[in-house]
Amino acid sequence: MTGGTVRERAGSQRRVEHTMGTVFSFDVRGGDPGRIPAALEEAVLWLRHVDEVFSTYRPTSQISRLAAGTLPLSKCTPEVWEVHRLCDAARRRTGGWFSAGYAGGFDPTGLVKGWAVERAAAMLAAAGADAVLVNGGGDVQAHGGPWRIGVSHPLRPGTLATVVHADGDVAVATSGAAERGPHIADPATGRPAAPAMASVTVVCPSLTDADVSATASYAMGTASFGWLADQPATEAFVVLPDGETWHTAGFGVPGPHSG
């Protein structure tokens, strides 16, 4: 899907785009006003390209053709190879709780959006923007700052469960069933994971990693608490089905990954 809106204010540009079946918003502050608009357009074109290559709903996408057996992996673009390697590394890092392999096929949906947003934000930072925030369907990659990133409460629509105060390279990803219903599978069964948590939010430098960790943790349930606490440069915040919360020891401590 194409089209979008751009709003400018002193020293900043904002843009909203609809692609990959969701909404992406850009907030870009500072930098060379002669370079930033072109970089913003490049970032939007990148997201559209990712949709064309990785969409599981487009029969002509490389991922759909790969699943149908009409396109071998050896003939796919370098991006598909890169995502394939990232998914394999994510499977190993999570002990198999994140998996892109279902029914013998390859579906990297749980990783691609975060990876695409992270790269889009990096494009804008590389173009000289002082601060960048890209939000893809609620998952955020930020550079510079300061930023205040609100996390929706899964049990109380219209309210926030917590706020992440970010300054630097910070990513925030949340997994849960509040908005999309039970869509995260237990890799062992292929069926939707039992809802042991209402939502889990992961904060770390990379949205690719944050997205993977949030997805895997939701599938693991409360058994993920120890695993989350052991992940390097990572903090997490969990809302349980009864409304109680849990968080890692460093969540909320002042710093680049504050909450």
Image (spheres, grey):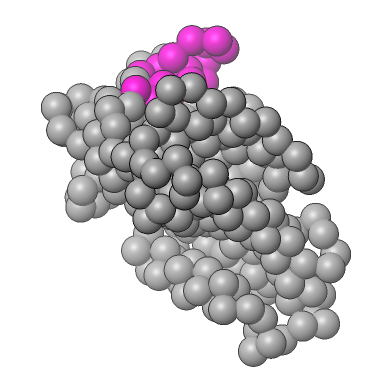
Q: Is residue 101 left or right of residue 255?
A: right
Residue 178 lies, with reference to residue 96, above or below; the image says above
Q: Looking at the image, which residue is at 74% across and 76% down?
A: 66
Residue 134 placed where, x, y %? 48, 39
- For the C terminus, give its image quadrant: top left
Q: Is residue 115 left or right of residue 206?
A: right
Question: Would you identify the image quadrant in which residue 256 lies?
Answer: top left
The residue lying toward the viewer, choosing from 138 and 28, is 28
As for residue 85 lying within the magenta part, the answer is no
Q: Looking at the image, which residue is at 37% across and 55% down?
A: 126
Q: Looking at the image, which residue is at 64% across and 55% down?
A: 45
Q: Which segment did they paint magenta?
A: 148-162
Question: Would you identify the image quadrant in which residue 15 lies?
Answer: top right
Residue 242 lies, with reference to residue 123, above or below; the image says above
Residue 59 lies, with reference to residue 221, above or below; the image says below
The residue lying toward the viewer, choosing from 53 and 227, is 53
Q: Is residue 57 left or right of residue 145?
A: right
